[in-house]
Image: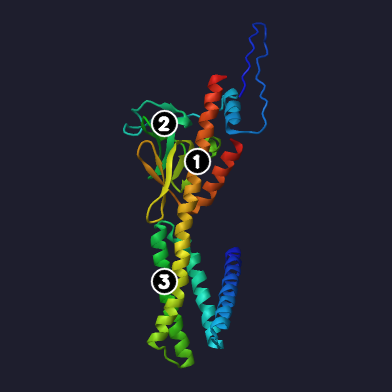
Amino acid sequence: MREKVVTFLVELCCVYTLVSVGGAIVNMLIGGQTNNLNVLVMFMTCFIGTLVLNLHKLFDRVSPLLMIIIQYLVACVLCAVMVLIVCWISGETVDPRGWYEFYRSFTIPYVILAGYYYYRVFSDTKKQDDLIQEIQKADREREDKDVIS
Amino acid sequence: MKLNLYENKDNLDEHVDVYYSNMRPVIRQLIDTVNSERPKLKGRPADEDLDDGEEILLDPKEIYYLDHIDRKLFAYTKDGVFRLMDTLSSCEETLWNYGFVRVSKSNLINVYKIKQLKPDMNMKVYASFDNGERICVNRSYKKSFNEYLQRIRRMG
């Protein structure tokens, strides 16, 4: 259990570092600004994303495609709860445009990563299939050689 | 592999010397045969009662995969389905050197019998066999499956 928690925290640190550095670069390029609340929301979003993706073992019986969809929906619900809590604490309300922007910035990287995962499943399987054919071919050649000897 | 046979009627100490560069599965099989330890699985036709069916010795080479259903273990071959009285984990241990690898909690497949490995549109990966059956390669076993294939290739 301790090992799993440590692994999760390491993954969370890596994800948050990448997202915050990426966000800083985008802000520098487009001249955007951020504030303390945004930084905390970004951290919480990374936390939810990492947590949800770490739950993949629970979905071992379902297909990967269904797992991706379920994980996305769970992450959406958790993010909505988080935003509502932040609004309740800060006493502010979320503009409909804000919801749209939030989910867009969450969905786009998720879809890109899901697409990459989809591609990896197919390419890895192709490699494994080639490996199996190679093993079988070597086995057949060995058997033929043994028969000739 | 070169095979030398020497016949000597006076020889009272029959023996086999094996010269090998690395311990490949074929060498392992040879040693097992000499030691009379080549694994043979005992099975009965699955469609007959356990007491009625004649016990048959199954060569691992003939088995496509092993399936564990309702606490019963079945071996699927070209000639039919046979019920085994072993456990899946003991078979996994015995057949490790004969191309059998675990791909899910209830399946052990023979990599030498896989016709094709292909993913579905829903990203589930299936190993298909000559008998038309398909076995799902579970995500949790993907890494160990890949490591096993690499190992077999290195040793082959």
Give the residue at the far top of this rendering: B10
Residue B9 occupies quadrant: top right
Both labels 2 and 3 in a single chain: no
Residue type at tag 1 = Ile
Discs 1 and 2 share one subunit: no
What secondary structure is marked by label 3?
helix
Q: Which residue is mark 2?
A: B43
Query: Which residue does the numbered mark 1 point to in the structure image?
Result: A132
Amino acid type at mark 2: Gly
Q: Earlier in the sequence, mark 3 or mark 1?
A: 3
Nearest-to-viewer mark from 3 and 1: 1
Give me the chain letter of mark 2.
Answer: B
Identify which residue is drawn at 60% across, 37% down. B155
Instruction: Tell me where residue B80 appears, x and y as whole percent.
Output: 35, 32
Total marks in image: 3
The residue that disc 3 covers is A74
**Residue at mark 2 to residue at mark 3: CA–CA distance:** 47 Å
